[in-house]
Amino acid sequence: MTHECDIGLIGLGVMGRNLALNMADHGFSVGVYNRTAEKTREFIEKEAGERKIRSAYTLQEFISLLKKPRAILIMVEAGAPVDDVIEGIFPLLEVGDLVIDGGNSHFSDTNRRGKSLAEKGLFYMGMGISGGEYGARHGPSMMPGGQKEAFERVRPILEAVSANVNGEPCVAFLGSGSAGHYVKMVHNGIEYGVMELIAETYDLMKRRLCLTNDELHSVYGQWNRKELNSYLIEITTKIFQQPDDKTAKRLIDMIVDQAKQKGTGKWTSCEAMDLQIPTPTIDAAVIARNLSTHKTEREAVSQMLQGPKTTFRGDKKTFIDHIRGALYACMIITYAQGMNLLQGASEAYGYGLNLEAVARIWRGGCIIRAALLENIQRAYENRRDLVNLLLDPHLGQEVMERQANLRRVVITAIELGLPVPAMMVTLAYFDGYRSAWLPANLTQAQRDYFGAHTYERIDKGEGFHTEWGRV
Ligand code: 6PG
């Protein structure tokens, strides 16, 4: 019984259980351990069946199940639980063993843990996994980073269990250190951005175009058949048809309008601010979730602060086409912002990221998978050093062709008094980015005026200060 398992898995939550089954179904033997023994017993009795899954009820027993050098996948909640698990197995590990954190850990924690394990000659891999329960069971997108030689060791397992698009696995070694968790963080930032953009299209069509849930189902369904084809549009389509099992209504209308978050979107925004890389669509998405949580206050304020409440009076079909174009343009720009952040981080932290590989492994299994990613992958295939996705001739053209749609939608939303923060800032980003001149000269002058911070001249360079106001 000892030393027979190809891989060990700690944490039998939803993701851990399904990954264990997925790995076993692909012929790998898996040793499993969970802090609460009852969960392990239940998993073995009810789910594991005849598969090559061995259970352990102490960490010593668990470690002894694994082939050497060991590979251990930790699937517990990010934060302190990961440190607790590492602390528990640390004394039992031997030089050359590999520990993989498959949760949504903050990349700075991954750096810290990697460093401390390396001191004992252990390998550490931070690996983002996307796709939720279904993905874990049938093929997620996996984003590993760390040491390449450690990745090579578990590569056959990861390639077998990950999603597959046109024969290509949705897993690739992404880069050194915490690259994997960083990429997953930005994946989630893009996820926040696209979800907010879709929510804004819903808001417009529900509150101002007065579409029913059936009509919304039909609109998103049509959109999903063309350029907007993506997992998030697909589930949105289905959501509008879901009946509520407690009332005669649709479930969507029984759900409170307050969005929670675990924090990965906020991490992305904070990181982007630190690296001074603009990701306004993602920032707006985080802010929109934050604002949504102030429900009681919003209800009170809605009685006090009035604005336009008129319904849309134009041609609905034409306007829905504008919304569709606007959404696609915004989606491209959101991915562009995320990719830009990855590029900046790769330089700042020396990750050595290959953005073509990132786009490739996001095409399947993950939450932000979309037909658009094929074009994004191609853009990086054509030019590895592409500065911004908007500079790819095809994607740039797609946005240019739809900018009139986006402007129309934003103007209309403003007139109708409806908040579309993500669309507004996405358009502003587009207009700012394509602007050779921005009014930052005035900002420089003001800083120097009140704080003697100096300014840079267009003719003589940096370091100038003026005693302002003496004319
Ligand atoms: C995924 C998801 C997954 C999870 C998010 C939800 O890629 O499978 O992103 O990681 O559902 O953490 O994040 P929020 O709770 O912050 O919305």
Image (cartoon, helix red, strand yellow):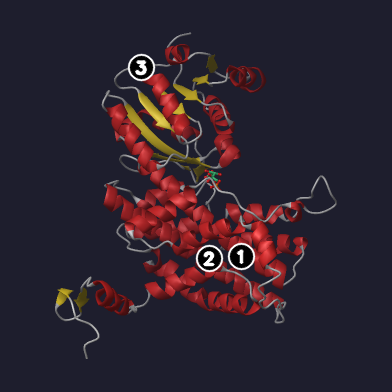
Disc 1 CB within 8 Å of nearest ligand 1 atom: no
What amino acid is labelled 3 in the image?
Answer: Pro
In terms of depth relative to the viewer, which is nearer, 461 or 409?
461
Q: Quadrant of the C terminus?
A: bottom left
Mark 3 surroundings: few (<14), some (14-19) or many (≥20) residues within 10 A: few
The percent position of residue 158, horizontal first and vertical second, equals 45, 33
Q: CA distance from mark 2 to mark 3?
A: 48 Å
- Compared to 160, does 38 lie above or below? above
Instruction: Name the residue: 44% across, 67% down.
Output: 395
Q: Is disc 2 in contact with disc 1, using a CB cutoff of under 8 Å?
A: yes
Which of the two marks, 1 or 3, is nearer to us in this view? Answer: 3
Q: Secondary structure at mark 2?
A: helix
For marks 2 and 3, the one nearer the N-term is 3
Mark 2 lies on residue: 422
The percent position of residue 264, horizontal first and vertical second, equals 48, 47
Mark 1 lies on residue: 200
